[in-house]
Structure formats: C-alpha cells, structure tokens
Image (spheres, helix red, strand yellow):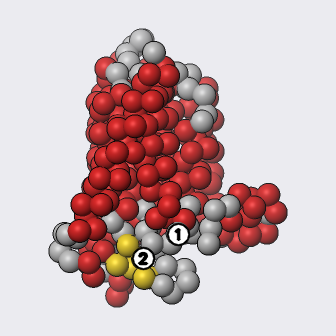
C-alpha cells in the first residue's frame, strides 16, 4: 500500500508540476516581467516554477494521501504556497526587510510587510493543518500541546526550506533528503512521492538556472515535508525535529548557510552536483 501511494503521489505531482509550468510559460499571468527576477549571477530567472511546484505538491497529496493526513497536507501546502506567492510578487523592494527577525521586528513596530503577512499566514494555515491532522489520543490539553508542536514544525520547516533557496537546486536536494526520512502516518508515502515527483519535474529548470522556486515553491515544499514529519513521527522525535529546525533558523540570523556550505567539502560537492 505504501509503495502504491508513493508512486501515485510522485506521478501525479510530476505531471501537474510540469503541466502548470508549461501552461504558465505560454501565458504568464500579468506578463513575463512580473515573474522575472535576477539570480546570484546577475542573470534573469523566472519565478513561475514556484506556483507550479506548489500546485503539483497539493494535487499529489490530495491524490495519494489518506484520511486526515490528506486534508492536512493540502491545507499546509496551499497556504504556504499562496502566502509565499504574495511575498514573491508584492514585496516592496525599496524598503526590503530581511529575515524572520526583521519581519517580526516590523510587526512590533506596527508595520506589516509582505514577509510579515507570510509569517502570520503560514503560521495560521499550519495551525489549521495541525488541528486537522493531529489525532486525539489523550486529554484535551495533551492534544492541544501536540497541535502546537506540529504547527510549529510545519511552519518552521516551511521557513527553513525557503532559507535554503539561495542557489540552484539546493532546496530541491534538501527536500529530497528530508522526504527520505523514515516516518509513518497517513501522509508518509504520499508526501515522499509528491515531493520527489515535483522536484523531478522542476529539476532541469532549477539546475539550469532558468527557474527558481521563490518563496511560493520553497515554502510549499517545506510545509508538506513538515506536515509529513508532524503526522508521522512519535512525540520525542517531533520535538527533536522541531528543536533542529528552530536551531537552524536562529543560526541563519547569524551565519550564512552559503558560506558554511562553501567551506565544507562534502556539502559543497552535493551543492554543486548537477549545476552548469
């Protein structure tokens, strides 16, 4: 049964991701310039990959997931992809605020940036997804605590994947690695399949530096991966995973992931794999 759900999720996600990306390329909503950004080489690159990946992930989870896990995965993925897309397209680059700390600081000052809206929106949809997917096996208090941990893991993983989307293929490779983490639950095989399917469909464009995930694609990938772990790991491992996500997020405020990768030979070898 697990293999069947994995294959179904992979095939559906790959087909939808490729189909949406091809259709968007023919007629980009709002025109091609709206979706064009500049990459780390100073070359033009398209954000159209992001919505295509988010759509593939959501439909893959819907087609191959089971029960509460299916609904939770779709809510988390669509929410993260949608709020990420708002930040991609509506960010005010003249007063750009960077990092989780920067957006939260702006909120404390009474300013709502698109990044701040994304933080609030993904937090809310992650909480809804966690409430849908978390089974109640004890008291109401224990269930509420599990929901809080699960929501934090979903939102935190969505943010962490976005922090990795700074070089071609990096977030896709990290997603594939996280999708391989053993987990049970109703979204385990479907989540793995959906992530691998969408990543395979986006691989050529991303590594070829034609496309980038942007916030929409990276946040959606992280949200589905986080939901898979939240609904499939026992409580001690969920807490450990959340601690790891929080630790890496805090570290990113002080340390450049790109610099650490460049200075670590085996990480650099993996990071460079497949690039032009």
Q: Which numbered dot is residue 234?
A: none
Whether residue 131 is visible here, answered yes or no, is: no
Above or below: residue 103 compared with residue 17? below
Q: Nearer the viewer, residue 176 or 84?
A: 176
Above or below: residue 10 compared with residue 210? above
Q: Which numbered dot is residue 208?
A: 1
Q: Measuring from the top left, give residue 129's x and y in whole percent.
A: 32, 35
Q: Measuring from the top left, give residue 72's x and y in whole percent.
A: 33, 32
Above or below: residue 76 compared with residue 119? above
The image quadrant of residue 253 is: bottom right
Q: Which numbered dot is residue 45?
A: 2
Q: Nearer the viewer, residue 237 or 19?
A: 19
Q: Measuring from the top left, give residue 266's x and y in whole percent.
A: 79, 57
Side (left or right) of 192 relative to 181: left
The image quadrant of residue 71 is: top left
Q: Nearer the viewer, residue 10 or 53?
A: 10
**Spatial CA span between label 1 and label 2:** 10 Å
Above or below: residue 134 compared with residue 264? above
Q: Tell me the crowding category of disc 1: few under 14, some 14 to 19, or many 20 or more residues within 10 angstroms, Cα based.
A: some
Residue under the point 50% across and 42% down: 196
Q: Earlier in the sequence, mark 1 or mark 2?
A: 2
Residue under the point 41% across and 12% down: 137
């Amino acid at each position: 049964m697990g293999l069947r759900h994995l294959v179904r999720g992979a095939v559906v996600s790959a087909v939808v991701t490729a189909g949406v990306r091809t259709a968007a390329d023919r007629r980009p909503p709002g025109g091609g310039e709206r979706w064009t950004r500049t990459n780390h080489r100073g070359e033009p690159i398209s954000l159209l990959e992001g919505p295509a990946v988010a759509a593939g992930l959501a439909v893959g989870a819907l087609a191959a997931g089971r029960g509460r896990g299916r609904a939770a995965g779709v809510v988390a993925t669509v929410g993260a992809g949608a709020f990420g897309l708002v930040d991609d397209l509506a960010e005010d680059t003249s007063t750009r605020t960077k990092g989780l700390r920067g957006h939260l600081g702006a909120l404390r000052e009474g300013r709502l940036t698109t990044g701040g809206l994304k933080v609030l929106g993904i937090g809310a949809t992650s909480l809804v997804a966690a409430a849908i997917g978390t089974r109640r096996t004890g008291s109401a208090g224990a269930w509420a605590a599990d929901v809080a941990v699960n929501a934090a893991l979903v939102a935190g993983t969505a943010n962490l994947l976005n922090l990795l989307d700074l070089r071609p293929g990096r977030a896709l490779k990290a997603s594939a690695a996280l999708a391989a983490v053993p987990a049970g639950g109703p979204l385990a095989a479907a989540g793995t399949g959906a992530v691998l399917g969408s990543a395979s469909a986006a691989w050529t464009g991303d590594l070829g530096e034609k496309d980038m995930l942007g916030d929409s694609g990276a946040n959606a990938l992280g949200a589905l991966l986080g939901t898979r772990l939240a609904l499939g790991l026992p409580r001690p491992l969920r807490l450990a995973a959340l601690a790891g996500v929080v630790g890496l997020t805090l570290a990113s405020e002080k340390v450049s992931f790109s610099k650490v990768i460049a200075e670590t030979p085996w990480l650099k070898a993996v990071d460079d794999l497949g690039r032009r």
